Amino acid sequence: MDTTQDAYWMPFTANRQFKKNPRLLSKASGMHYWDDQGREILDGVAGLWCVNAGHGRDKITQAIQAQAAEMDFCPPFQMAHPKAFELARRVADLAPAGMGKVFFTNSGSESVDTALKMALAYHRVRGEGQRTRLIGRERGYHGVNFGGISVGGMVANRKMFGSMLGGVDHIRHTHDPARNSYTVGQPAHGAEFADDLERLVALHDASTIAAVIVEPVAGSTGVLVPPVGYLQRLREICDKHGILLIFDEVITGFGRTGNPFAAQTFGVTPDLMVVAKGLTNGAVPMGAVIARDSIYDAFMNGPEHLIEFFHGYTYSAHPLACAAGLATLDTYAEEGLLTRAQQVQAYFAESLHALRGEPNVIDVRNIGLVGGIELASLPGEPAKRAFGIFLDCYKEGVLIRTTGDTLALSPPLIIEREHIDRIVGTIRAALRRAA
Ligand code: PXG
Ligand code: PLP
């Protein structure tokens, strides 16, 4: 083993396997990475679902460089800098009407925990402090902090970490391959999965429930697109019972589904929206929670000199992140990237669904510029077949992502047809080689 790699404990990585045969990237531009040997690699996953405008965008680079030279850090508690206000305004302007308040964090995981705390505190400041229960969903991914894994529904991310938050329950996931496999876009069947929330209301009583958190499209558990009418039904049940609806848009935010947010694509407005990743095009870590005005307003009570919400991070609204965020939103606007998926999604869908019938493919799912190709697992060895395909594609110069035995694609929104052809062609060849 190369001893220079000993010290780095890699996140979500098979450390021993990786260090025997490392995959090192050293340069990125547009749709591509280059490895440490100078080999070009087409990026089929926007880094990790985050580099939505493509890599190395000049405007973003320059904004970060200029900000670092002008002011490196500004304390975010009882102090602020102009770009923090400006970025909050710009993000709020992209959000559904009425969602006008933006709280900054440094990641999706921090944003999730921030949103859960906001929901609990919101009920409390309104005199409904008994609403302490949080509801997540099976197969949900909400990052890796304790709040997020508590409401999350990925067994491997939970089972090692004790009892987590108390008072959490889960509704069922919406994956229903028997009725919905190979659906192009939103599945027709399964709006009734939302009624599971009524079951939990009957069990716990609505007066104990603070919020429900779901990803509009579940990403990390294999690209699960919401059935037609499902999110509407969740919204109705939340409204009926005074429960807050939180959308985790860490992946779906910033153009992934053809609109700035999936809330707009599906026509359902949540009460709190969790974002990260595409907010800065992945260039500087940053996340945010976007809140309905009425939620913020509920906190603005009591003596004016007192802190209203005892929460925040040293690096909330970091100047470099704000500068990167503003330049990112400029780039999205100048190039129409937040709606560009609408133009490319038909070709993307057609190309992915043409993989039906290739060896071991059992389902294809897609919406906007996100896609999942599910493979039959090797008997007794879950995730191994997909990982083999990942390694083969990487060898052939295409970066994809796997989750379980699903191949996931979420390319930069600047993708052209020739890139789609190359990604899908490489996957097809890898599937055939592996068979
Ligand atoms: N919520 C959702 C819906 C996410 O997809 C997070 C929260 C956490 O964000 P941070 O910035 O703390 O990582 C995410 C992150 C994958 C994969 O390919 C997906 C994510 C992160 C790492 C890997 O499965 N999404
Ligand atoms: N731990 C200690 C000892 C701290 O002083 C702080 C912040 O001041 C934190 C953790 C939290 O760090 P952050 O604000 O970067 O999340």
Image (cartoon, rainbow, N blue to C red):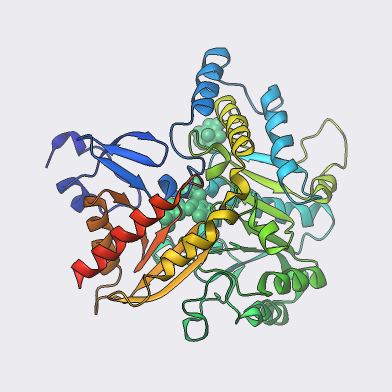
Could you tell me which residue is drawn at 24 percent across and 80 percent down? 379
Of the 4 image quadrants, the one containing the N terminus is top left
User: Quadrant of residue 120 in the image?
Assistant: bottom right
Q: Which is nearer the eye, 405 or 356?
A: 356
Relative to 7, is 170 above or below? below
Relative to 282, is 431 above or below? below
Residue reaching furthest to the left: 1
Q: Which is nearer the eye, 398 or 325?
A: 398
Residue 76 position, x and y percent, is 65, 28
Residue 4 position, x and y percent, is 18, 33
Q: Is residue 222 visible?
A: no
Q: Is residue 280 left or right of residue 20?
A: right
Q: Is residue 293 left or right of residue 46?
A: right
Q: Is residue 315 left or right of residue 411?
A: right
Residue 352 position, x and y percent, is 42, 66
Could you tell me which residue is drawn at 30 percent across and 44 percent down? 41
Residue reaching furthest to the top: 70
Q: Is residue 360 visible?
A: yes
Could you tell me which residue is drawn at 55 percent across and 76 percent down? 174
User: Quadrant of residue 359 in the image?
Assistant: bottom left
Of the 4 image quadrants, the one containing the C terminus is bottom left
Residue 303 position, x and y percent, is 88, 35
